[in-house]
Amino acid sequence: MDRTVIAGLADLREDLAAFYRDLHQHPELSLQETRTAGLLAQRLREAGVDEVAEQVGTTGVVGVVRNGDGPVVMLRADFDALPVEEKTGLPYASRARGTDPDGRDVPVMHACGHDMHAACLIGAATLLAGARESWRGTLLVVFQPAEELAVGARGMIDDGLFERFPAPQIVLGQHVAPLPAGFIGYGTGPVMAAADSLGITLHGRGAHGSRPEASVDPVLMAAHLVTRLQGIVSREVPPAESAVVTVGRLQAGTKDNIIPDSAELGVNIRTYTPQTRDLVRAAVERIVRAESAAGAAVSEPTLTWFGSTPALVSDPTATQTTIAAFTEHFGEERIQTMPLVNASEDVGVFGEALQVPTVFWFWGGLDPETVITAMQEDRFDQIPGNHSPFFAPLVEPTLSTGVEALTLAALTWLDTP
């Protein structure tokens, strides 16, 4: 592998850092990332990418670098932000606001590091497009929207991603995490959980708060339901398996002395195997219907599944090959294995759709001394991580490490001298 490709990063570093800060200061919510998408497309064109397409899957951006016969390798980054009010105190902190899917005015922040993902992929695409003498094949660069809603990958596929552009033989991606900056973390097989969300409406009959006998109380149903759902993992999922059932939303009524006629709940599920996923989903539906019946509901509950994404599986063989290249470049001391992550990522949808390997890794973004000390003192959970209003990756060495990792991974799978 010709590692002189990475030497070009020295000339890009300052510009990429400014680009990252700009993205961080101007975040956009899922499927609203129009400014960001425009900047990404512009950067790809300036880098000499052969073909650049916008509005793929609503706001996605795709770039293709054709460089003769050889493998088709896909690099992917997401670029949507979250409805979080930033509290980092950074000079380039976001003060942006947006409108969420329910029409509410909300603060917006890149609290999950997707701005870093996007900047790193621009850097890798620029290096690879400018060093075609070092590799052969086709590079497919995919900037995916709406990862936070778990619909972006599927939306791009449904919009003809793999019919309109070369279909890859491998999908490569990464995520910045609360690890020491400059370090790479990885796993093989399932590395992130499948996610499923369920909206529930329980139907009762409203009444005055002083006359509960005249009502069918959906709040009481909801209270029993929240408690009963917690028994699924402890009593139905085998101890050797891992699953999470969370009730993150419970809304009912408008006043303390009025029994409402409905209650709404939002449930989120995380699992790692198809068998456990099917078990937990079926158990949730069974319990919802049973509690509704036990509460004498006036009609069947309304259940709406959404935001589903499969477990992210990092192909064991392909991952080991990629990590071997990382180890040679970064050094063994900067490579570490990761435990299972209960969070979810829809990047696996791409590889699953084509039945090709996906390789996914994490890289650190926080001050190494702070992270290592927290680990030693058993207070790692107190460090601001992804989705925290205080999450603030160091610009360097985080940016350089991310660019190098994506570039090395691509060169591992493209034909090289």
Image: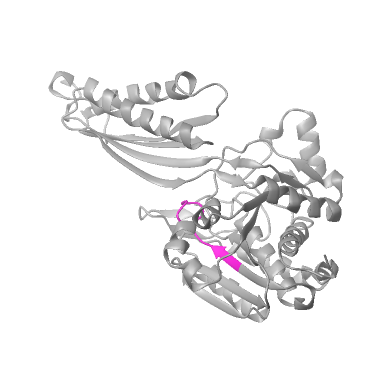
Residue at (59, 73) in percent of width and height? 63
Give the vertical position of 390 relative to 292 (above or below): below
Q: Which residues are magenta?
A: 141-151
Instruction: Characterize the magenta stretch by its predominant secondary structure.
Output: loop
Residue at (65, 51) in percent of width and height? 360
Question: Would you say residue 269 sits in the magenta stretch?
Answer: no
Q: Quadrant of residue 278?
A: top left
Question: Looking at the rendering, in which quadrant would you find the C terminus?
Answer: bottom right
Residue 87 x %, y %: 61, 49
The residue most toward the left is: 214
Question: Looking at the rendering, in which quadrant would you find the N terminus?
Answer: bottom right
Name the residue nearer the viewer: 27 or 403: 403
Q: Examine the rendering and report whether any part of residue 389 can be seen.
A: no
Residue 92 x %, y %: 66, 61
Name the residue nearer the viewer: 356 or 224: 356
Does residue 401 appear to the left or right of 188 in the view shown? right
Q: Quadrant of residue 139?
A: bottom right
Q: Examine the rendering and report whether any part of residue 69 can be seen.
A: yes
Residue 409 x %, y %: 73, 59
- What colouring does the structure picture have? one colour
Residue at (57, 75) in percent of width and height? 41
Give the vertical position of 132 relative to 336 (above or below): below
Residue 199 x %, y %: 34, 40
Does residue 331 appear to the left or right of 271 in the view shown? right
Question: Would you say residue 144 sits in the magenta stretch?
Answer: yes
